[in-house]
Image: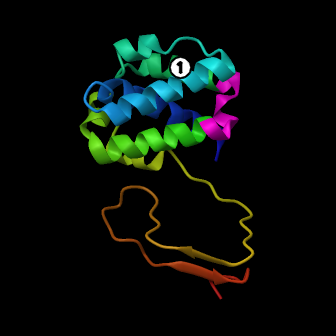
Amino acid sequence: MDPSSAVTMIVMALATGAVAGAAEVAIKDGYEGLKRLLKSRFSLASVEPLEQKPDSKAKQESVAEDVAAAGADRDEEVLRAAQELIRLIESRAPEAAEAAGITIAQLRAGSSINIKDLVAEGSINITGLRAGNTGQPPLGNATSEGGGDPNA
């Protein structure tokens, strides 16, 4: 995952978790777990200002700067915790994203996705891939068996 995308995903999880945590126990647990990871592993500065104003772009940017500076965006456990929290919010309290000033599309994408030099021992099957919000269905599927060219 691109470092800036990882930072964005973590901050989106924190902002939406701050909003949704009061409404849903599983989300609150996920949110508190992500905060604990960030504090214990990275001595990350407090995210409480983001809790007070989760829709504040300035507070989101400040936390993003702290996350990047600490290197938390490269920690697999932090990334998994943020992804799980986003999944919970999306399924149980999607309205929290808008309350935090984040669109559901941003929450789903976690920013941009970059794939480079993908190599698989078996097959690769990508379905429903879209870039941007075109309002159109995906153009098709790409499948590669045994490392061949999906365009062949």
Which amino acid type is shown beneath numbered disc 1? Answer: Val
Q: Is 26 or 42 nearer to us in this picture?
A: 26
Look at the image and tell me whether residue 69 can be seen: no
* Residue 99, horizontal then vertical, whole percent: 27, 29
* Residue 38, horizontal then vertical, whole percent: 59, 23
Q: Is 64 or 39 nearer to us in this picture?
A: 39
Q: Is residue 142 above or below residue 8?
A: below
Describe the colour scheme in one phrase. rainbow
Query: Is residue 65 left or right of 121 when viewed as pictured?
Result: left
Query: Is residue 65 left or right of 56 when viewed as pictured?
Result: right
Q: Which residue is mark 1?
A: 63
Tell me where the magenta segment starts and ends, as one range.
68-77
Please tell me whether residue 127 belongs to the stretch shown in magenta: no
Look at the image and tell me whether residue 61 can be seen: yes
Magenta segment main secondary structure: helix
Q: Is residue 6 above or below residue 122?
A: above
* Residue 152, horizontal then vertical, whole percent: 65, 88
Dot 1: element: helix
Query: Is residue 119 left or right of 97 when viewed as pictured?
Result: right
**Crowd rating for badge 1 (residues with CA inside 10 Å; few <14, some 14–19, many 20+):** many
Q: Is 33 or 54 nearer to us in this picture?
A: 33
What residue is shown at x 33% (from left), y 27% (from top)? 21
* Residue 120, horizontal then vertical, whole percent: 72, 72
Q: Is residue 136 above or below residue 82?
A: below
What residue is shown at x 41% (from left), y 49% (from top)? 108
Q: How many marks?
A: 1
